[in-house]
Amino acid sequence: MQNTTTVLKRELRKQKREEAYILRSVRESLAYDLLHGNIKNAKEIWERSQLAELPLIPNTVLFLSIDHFSRLVENKGEMWKNALREEVLQAIRECNLQYESLKVLVTQEKYAILLALPVQIEEKNYKALSVEYAEKIRAEINQKTEYTVTIGIGNYYEDARNLHLSFREGEQAQTYRLFSTENSIIHIDDLDIFETTEYYDFKVRIQSITEKFSLGDIKAVLHRWEEIYDSIVKHVHIKPEEFRLQVLDLLFSLSKSAIQNGASPKNMMPLQIKHAKELHDLETLAEIDKWVRTIINEYNLQVNEGHNEQSLKSVQEILQYIEEHFQEEIGLETVAAQVNLSPNYVSAIFKQTTGSSFSYYVTDRRMKKAKHLLEDFNMTVYEIAETIGYSSSQYFSRVFKNHVGMTPSAYRNSLHSTKY
């Protein structure tokens, strides 16, 4: 009788181990497919999530990297490396999160954590909640291991078919540890806090490339790149890793712009990943120059193939008109008349193409101009308001604060403190 009981217990333990292994395999398979955008059917995602026993479908990705991994494993064998990775992964698994998550190893020292944040909360709270979870995971790892980690956080995506975008954003955010310290948590929306003055200047110029790309003016795009490339060649004091990071930002910006202007995300995401890997292997500025030119032309082709030509042309004309008249009072009716389309149709194709509403785009363009003008300390806020199309400086100040997060005067003061 005792032997029979022992055998049954042994069989039960074996069965539980097998069930746990199968469940983990199902979850890891789902996680990898979501991270790489391999699932295009919402029903399939739902069914596989149920099979993986997930109460909620993942919607946000944390990208976690073990700090100084190369140094930690230097001259160590594979068994030691595996033990280090497993130690960190075990700490992640033991972290008590309120909502179920998936955890997988994506490279030898980097993990993806797919969070299922609760739905139907205010949009601004998704960021706060993902940061809170990242802090819990970091604390667990710090407490149970001797290692520190850097965690990059992507944005929340309600549609799990877009979760690969959150993964790439988290990966991109994680690379910004160059401007931070070890054991950091970096949300994709907070990259600005790690920028150097030199990096900010480059980002502004990169933005100008993206704006011209959105207008379909490839000649101007190539010209802007030539200006940037020439300045990099002359300022040889820039570190290679910083330049690579800046060029990687250009790749992400152009990819996003291409998708917003009609290129297929299905085609663009593999291209973005492929080109990011290529950049790692490029060894000279000349090679990078050739690589960037190839990408610009390739992405432009993707836009032309993926978007209705006439709609794109109309939106480009509207964007050009905004660029030339944003200092004036312009509305949907005005730009619709310029392209001989109805205001409702213009509103729809503008949103579909650029990813933002017409009014937001115009306001954003005005605020960018305002930020530039605020660098001129001789201009008053009233003069700046008039220059960009606001008759009331008080109204301009309210719009600026809502858009930028601080008043024009506070923004100017921040520039002054940075400068001196």
Image (cartoon, rainbow, N blue to C red):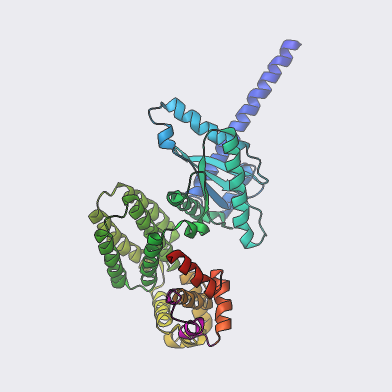
Is residue 381 one of those drawn in magenta?
yes
**Residue ranking furthest to the right:** 1
Front position in the image: 219 or 419: 419
- Above or below — where is 137 with respect to 245? above
Q: Residue at x 35, y 48 (%)?
A: 277
- Left or right of residue 401: residue 176: left
Which of the pair 324/195 is nearer the observer?
A: 195
Q: Residue at x 48, y 86 (%)?
A: 386
Q: Is residue 153 visible?
A: no
Quarter occupied by residue 377: bottom left
**What residue is drawn where x is 51% and y is 58%?**
190
Q: Is residue 53 left or right of residue 362?
A: right
Q: Which residues are magenta?
A: 372-391
- Quadrant occupied by the C terminus: bottom left
**Which percent across, then down, holds residue 29?**
52, 41
Direction from residue 346 to residue 228 in the image, left or right:
left
Residue 350 location, x and y as percent? Answer: 48, 75
